[in-house]
Image (cartoon, rainbow, N blue to C red):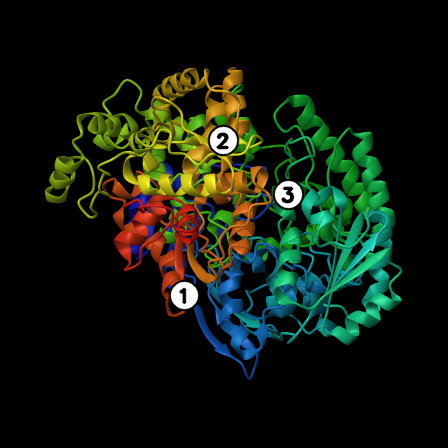
């Protein structure tokens, strides 16, 4: 038998694309977005159809199975396997052509759906199927799973929108599929001719969401037009590899209107959904209150405990629908921005549903079963009862207009008893779905999760026909074996089994990553941050999901075998900016910055670290020493000539201030503005950046806070949030520094702590209590932390800021977005007459990251994605450039002609001048 090493060498010699059988590549593809894990032999990224054919021929000769893979967002396990994974996203991702007259497009399988949608939008066209993962799922994956999405009520499934397919089978044979037998593999026509009765009685007459198994085989009937391409859709990579597709496009409605209908409960919404179909809606989506964040339910949604989102082509049709709907309340949304905000609630459900109300995890596995829409209400009532009978919880939502229900359930997939319950529940639920005339899969495929249960849905003749159909295409059985026919048990190869018991917070954290791949989006715009390094490189290795997968495999020890010393994990985490964007933007709250800190802590334990860890990680102590020696000027001069060893030579170091902030503060003793007897006292935190690098920001903040009537105090002696030690993984040192800080603060009375630097505020709020969980002082300080805007809003609510009345541009700090929120800042800017939106994304400097060797290109790429273009776009309006983060201000200064300011500086400049102005 051919060894993996021999196979790798053969593939390398005959393919133009990348061939990687290394630990990192294999670890990144052990899982998709399901509960399952399989370890592949290697990964191939083919350049073109010729590479695909060569790979399939070589693998067939060697006896290795092949798994085609797109975005890896499959939730039933069909993108996992033990052979060679074909990564079709790296090179075969082109939009080949668009014909707006014929309303067709030619696409490669790795093309992300949103790229197709963006390209055809100027023609007034769209691709009808639109799953919620549209920003990262690929056309090849959609064809494999026969994806549908919210608009299938109007435009059908992927199979309804495919005209032709170019397919290569295991062994290298190529086919061009369309309508009719031309281009089909030998034996297929004969198979159909010999099974017409089975096709007509066992498959025909189903409803639109019958996706399970090879459910589209009835398209091969003569009366259905012999749709060979249509029948191929939904085959989950078990028949061959799509190398090109001709897809049909639809006319996009010019001004769709969203009607949100409120109902008393989920059953009432489900019962009503089928009755709305006669009005010709584009979508009928449903969800209940237990899926919706409290703020959203109290804000834009109408009254009710469940809602239907019904999109209509125009306002007249929407108003007619509302008049005829028996809803508790309704809301019509014509404004596109308002519609996007509401749809975001629905689209984020795939992640929201992974958390139970008490913070526990819920898992896929029964994500998309479907019943005829008229049966949906009755089905959901019985489904809820079945959950309760098994002591399980889940939150159904989904495409109510087509009877397709998404749900994630809090299975225990670790302990034998929990796995046994998962298995027994799955069997009973399959029977329930079938009793309502439904389909085990309504759009995402069966994969490993449901294929074993297909005999409960189809009779033995249909199951035998499925096997014969697979064998016509793949007689050697090398294409994604174990899916759809001759499947493995649904409780085998669960991904949690690989993790060691009692793995702690890191193990729980990486297991939380369910692989929905929101971190892989390349969509520009909006407030989101995650994941800047992936957006810069496009490599799965640098996505939040990719890093979580590598950490998972490091803990498992099967693929990544050197534990905390792993070079593969270190390489993946090296380009993590610790921006914390994933903490808020990841639907399940994966916190890669915290995981990186823990990894670096263990990785460098007992070893000499890189110089940057000492220079930048120990920045507070280093700068304090410089200040005590009054050596800022000579050090600035030396740094201009030659940067310190271990740091990049691609950017200058920011100059140190001659007079630290606290020295200035002590010099003005007795000069503070006298306050009234009831003035609130606040502590202004002298963070390292304000203290030594930007003291003028601190002086401006003092002036504004005192003008607002607050009594300002500053801690005596140096205090530190530990941020630089945490970001470089020096966690023991961080704990020591934080304990010392808490001791220094013990004599200070309890009062709000105003922190100007967002990254330091975030560290005090989250890292401090996480590092010292048993110290009550840590929790008290974390609770006392306020941002500059929060302090003014809470403790000087009647103060009127100066009216600046000018536009602003700039960036919200990543840590503020992820941890602190910027609602108070927005309100303060509005009261001051500062108009305009700040950029999302990441500035790319990210504290120590941009100064470390090898990071400059990624750092600049991050800035060029959103921040710098937003500044240039606002240039003609003469905006004030706003960035509360010191890193953001430094990046702007070094990469653009602009100078950015903290909000405190802008407000201070608008106050009446009192005495000599402070020089920066």
Residue shown at the point (71%, 73%) measured from the top left: 313
Residue 75, relative to residue 803: is it above or below? above
Q: Earlier in the sequence, mark 3 or mark 1?
A: 3
Question: What residue is shown with label 1?
Answer: 874
Question: What residue is shown with label 3?
Answer: 352
Is the residue under label 1 in contact with that under label 2 (CB below 8 Å)?
no
Say whether residue 802 is visible: yes
The quarter of the picture where residue 317 lies is: bottom right
How packed mark 3 is, by other alpha carbons closer than 10 Å (few <14, some 14-19, many 20 or more), is: many
Residue shown at the point (34%, 21%) measured from the top left: 717
Question: What residue is shown with label 2?
Answer: 682
How packed mark 2 is, by other alpha carbons closer than 10 Å (few <14, some 14-19, many 20 or more), is: many
Coordinates of residue 835 in the picture (x, y in percent): 50, 60
Label 2 sits on a secondary structure element that is strand
Is the residue under label 2 in contact with that under label 3 (CB below 8 Å)?
no
Coordinates of residue 337 in the picture (x, y in percent): 61, 63
């Amino acid at each position: 038998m051919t060894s993996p090493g021999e196979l790798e060498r053969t593939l390398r010699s005959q393919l133009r694309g990348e061939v990687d059988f290394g630990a990192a590549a294999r670890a990144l593809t052990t899982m998709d977005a399901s509960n399952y894990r399989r370890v592949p032999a290697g990964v191939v990224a083919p350049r073109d159809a010729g590479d695909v054919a060569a790979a399939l021929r070589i693998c067939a000769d060697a006896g290795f199975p092949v798994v085609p893979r797109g975005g890896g967002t499959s939730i039933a396990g069909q993108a996992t396997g033990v052979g060679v994974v074909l990564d079709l996203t790296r090179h075969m991702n082109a939009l080949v052509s668009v014909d707006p007259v014929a309303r067709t497009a030619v696409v490669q399988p790795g093309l992300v759906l949103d790229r197709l949608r963006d390209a055809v939008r100027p023609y007034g066209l769209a691709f009808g199927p639109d799953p919620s993962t549209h920003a990262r799922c690929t056309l090849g994956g959609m064809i494999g799973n026969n994806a549908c999405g919210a608009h299938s009520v109007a435009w059908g499934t992927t199979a309804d929108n495919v005209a032709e397919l170019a397919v290569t089978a295991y062994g290298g044979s190529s086919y061009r599929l369309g309508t009719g037998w031309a281009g089909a593999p030998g034996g297929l026509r004969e198979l159909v001719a010999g099974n017409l009765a089975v096709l007509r009685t066992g498959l025909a007459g189903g409803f639109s969401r019958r996706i399970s198994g090879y459910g589209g085989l009835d398209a091969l009937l003569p009366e259905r037009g012999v749709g060979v391409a249509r029948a191929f859709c939904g085959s989950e990579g078990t028949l061959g590899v799509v190398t090109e597709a001709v897809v049909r496009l639809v006319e996009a409605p010019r001004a769709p209107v969203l009607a949100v209908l409120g109902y008393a409960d989920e059953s009432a919404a489900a019962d009503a959904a089928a009755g709305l179909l006669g009005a010709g809606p584009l979508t009928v989506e449903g969800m209940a209150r237990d899926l919706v964040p409290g703020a959203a339910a109290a804000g834009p949604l109408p009254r009710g405990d469940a809602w239907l989102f019904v999109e209509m082509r125009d306002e007249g049709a929407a108003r007619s629908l509302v008049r005829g709907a028996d809803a508790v309340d309704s809301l019509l949304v014509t404004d596109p921005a308002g519609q996007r905000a509401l749809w975001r609630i629905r689209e984020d459900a795939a992640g929201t549903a992974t958390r139970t109300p008490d913070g526990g995890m819920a898992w896929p596995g029964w994500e998309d079963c479907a019943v005829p829409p008229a049966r949906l209400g009755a089905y959901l009532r019985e489904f809820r009862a079945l959950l309760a009978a098994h002591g399980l919880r889940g939150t159904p939502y989904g495409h109510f207009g087509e009877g397709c229900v998404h749900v994630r359930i809090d299975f225990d997939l670790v302990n034998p008893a929990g796995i046994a319950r998962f298995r027994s529940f799955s069997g009973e639920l399959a029977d329930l779905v079938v009793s309502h005339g439904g389909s085990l899969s309504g759009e995402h495929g069966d994969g490993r999760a449901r294929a074993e249960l297909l005999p409960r849905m189809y009779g033995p003749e249909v199951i035998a026909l499925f096997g014969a159909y697979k064998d016509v295409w793949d007689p050697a059985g090398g294409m994604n074996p174990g899916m759809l026919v001759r499947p493995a048990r649904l409780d085998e190869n669960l991904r949690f089994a690989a993790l060691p018991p009692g793995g702690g917070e890191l193990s729980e954290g990486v297991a939380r990553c369910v692989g929905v791949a929101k971190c892989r989006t390349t969509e520009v715009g909006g407030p989101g941050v995650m994941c800047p390094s992936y957006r810069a490189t496009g490599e799965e290795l640098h996505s939040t999901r990719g890093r979580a997968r590598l950490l998972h495999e490091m803990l498992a020890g099967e693929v990544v075998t050197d534990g905390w010393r792993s070079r593969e994990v270190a390489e993946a985490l090296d380009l993590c900016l610790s921006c914390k964007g994933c903490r808020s933007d990841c639907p399940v709250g994966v916190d890669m910055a915290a995981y990186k800190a823990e990894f670096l802590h263990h990785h460098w334990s007992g070893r000499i670290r890189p110089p940057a860890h000492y220079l930048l990680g120990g920045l507070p102590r280093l700068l304090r020493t410089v200040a005590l020696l009054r050596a800022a000027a000579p050090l600035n001069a030396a740094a201009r000539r030659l940067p310190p060893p271990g740091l990049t030579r691609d950017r200058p170091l920011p100059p140190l201030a001659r007079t630290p902030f606290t020295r200035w503060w002590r010099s003005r003793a007795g000069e503070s503005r006298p306050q009234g007897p009831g003035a609130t006292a606040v502590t202004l935190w002298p963070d390292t950046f304000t203290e030594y690098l930007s003291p003028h920001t601190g002086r401006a903040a003092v002036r504004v806070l005192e003008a607002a009537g607050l009594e300002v105090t500053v801690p005596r002696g140096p205090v530190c949030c530990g941020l630089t030690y945490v970001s470089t993984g020096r966690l023991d040192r961080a704990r020591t520094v934080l304990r010392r800080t808490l001791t220094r603060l013990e004599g200070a009375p309890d009062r709000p702590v105003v922190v100007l630097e967002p990254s330091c505020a975030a560290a005090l709020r989250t890292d401090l209590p996480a590092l010292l969980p048993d110290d009550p002082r840590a929790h008290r300080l974390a609770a006392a932390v306020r941002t500059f805007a929060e302090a003014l809003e809470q403790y000087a609510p009647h103060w009127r800021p100066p009216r600046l009345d000018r536009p602003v541009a700039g960036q919200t700090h990543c840590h503020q977005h992820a941890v602190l929120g910027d609602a108070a800042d927005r309100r303060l800017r509005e009261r001051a007459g500062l108009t305009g939106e700040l950029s999302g994304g990441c500035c790319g400097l990210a504290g120590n990251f941009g100064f470390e060797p090898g990071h400059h290109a990624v750092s600049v790429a991050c800035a060029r994605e959103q921040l710098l273009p937003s500044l240039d776009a606002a240039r003609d309006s003469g905006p004030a450039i706003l960035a509360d983060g010191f890193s953001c201000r430094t990046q702007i200064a070094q990469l653009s002609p602009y100078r950015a300011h903290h909000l405190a500086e802008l407000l201070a400049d608008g106050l009446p001048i009192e005495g000599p102005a402070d020089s920066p």
